[in-house]
């Protein structure tokens, strides 16, 4: 059996932990209910949190159950494993905290560019859609669901 892929294991554990933290602490204590709305305010955060838990668990489970193919030993920057996943987790946590003071349209493009640079994608062609995607999400939520993002 090939060695365990620790990157997927740690990534799955961290994302599942983030989803559980959102479900147990962030959403119940920091999302205010508004009974006059068609769609409850906490619906989308709960969907995202449940998806994080499910996908994180699947990713960690895949790392445990499915053996990664053995490649020749060649160290690269991608071999950082848990340290890289902790960096992604820290960026997501910082963005979540920043959204308490700054609007979504400011925080999300900065987070997207930060993640792209963190993973080594520095081509402008790849960064432009990453900045446009949060704007499209904002417009979809604002005019499709008639909701305001923070």
Image: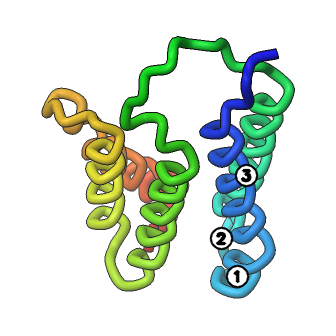
**Residue 18 x, y percent position in the rendering:** 67, 62
The furthest residue to the left: 124
- Judging by the rendered image, the residue that carries numbered circle 2 is 41
Quadrant location, the N terminus: top right
Q: Nearer the viewer, residue 121 or 27?
A: 121
C-alpha distance separating marks 2 and 3: 27 Å
Q: Secondary structure at mark 3?
A: helix
**In the rendered image, which quarter is residue 104 located in?**
bottom left
**In the rendered image, which quarter is residue 67 located in?**
top right
How many residues crowd mark 3 within 10 Å: few (<14), some (14–19), many (20+)? many
Whichever of labels 1 and 2 marks the residue nearer the N terminus, that label is 1
Label 3 vs label 1, nearer the camera: 3
* Residue 106 falls left or right of residue 122: right
Q: Secondary structure at mark 2?
A: loop
* Residue name at image x 73 percent, y 40 percent: 55
Q: Which mark is residue 33?
A: 1
How many residues crowd mark 2 within 10 Å: few (<14), some (14–19), many (20+)? some
C-alpha distance separating marks 3 and 1: 30 Å
Q: How is the image coloured?
A: rainbow
* Residue name at image x 80 percent, y 43 percent: 57
Label 2 vs label 3, nearer the camera: 3
- Judging by the rendered image, the residue that carries numbered circle 3 is 13
Tag 1 near tag 2, CB within 8 Å: yes
* Residue 48 falls left or right of residue 54: left
Q: Nearer the viewer, residue 149 or 86?
A: 86
C-alpha distance separating marks 1 and 2: 6 Å
Q: Nearer the viewer, residue 1 or 139?
A: 1
* Residue name at image x 74 percent, y 80 percent: 25
Q: Is residue 94 above or below residue 143?
A: below
């Amino acid at each position: 059996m090939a060695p365990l892929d620790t990157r997927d294991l740690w990534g799955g554990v961290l994302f599942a932990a983030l989803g559980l933290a959102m479900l147990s602490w962030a959403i119940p204590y920091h999302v205010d209910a508004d009974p006059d709305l068609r769609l409850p305010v906490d619906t989308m955060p709960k969907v995202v949190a449940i998806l994080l838990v499910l996908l994180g668990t699947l990713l960690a489970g895949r790392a445990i159950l499915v053996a990664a193919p053995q490649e020749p030993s060649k160290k690269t920057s991608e071999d950082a494993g848990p340290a890289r996943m902790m960096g992604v987790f820290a960026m997501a946590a910082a963005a979540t905290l920043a959204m308490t003071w700054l609007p979504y349209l400011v925080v999300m493009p900065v987070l997207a560019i930060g993640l792209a640079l963190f993973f080594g994608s520095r081509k402008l062609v790849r960064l432009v859609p990453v900045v446009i995607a949060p704007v499209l999400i904002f417009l979809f939520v604002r005019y499709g669901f008639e909701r305001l993002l923070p």
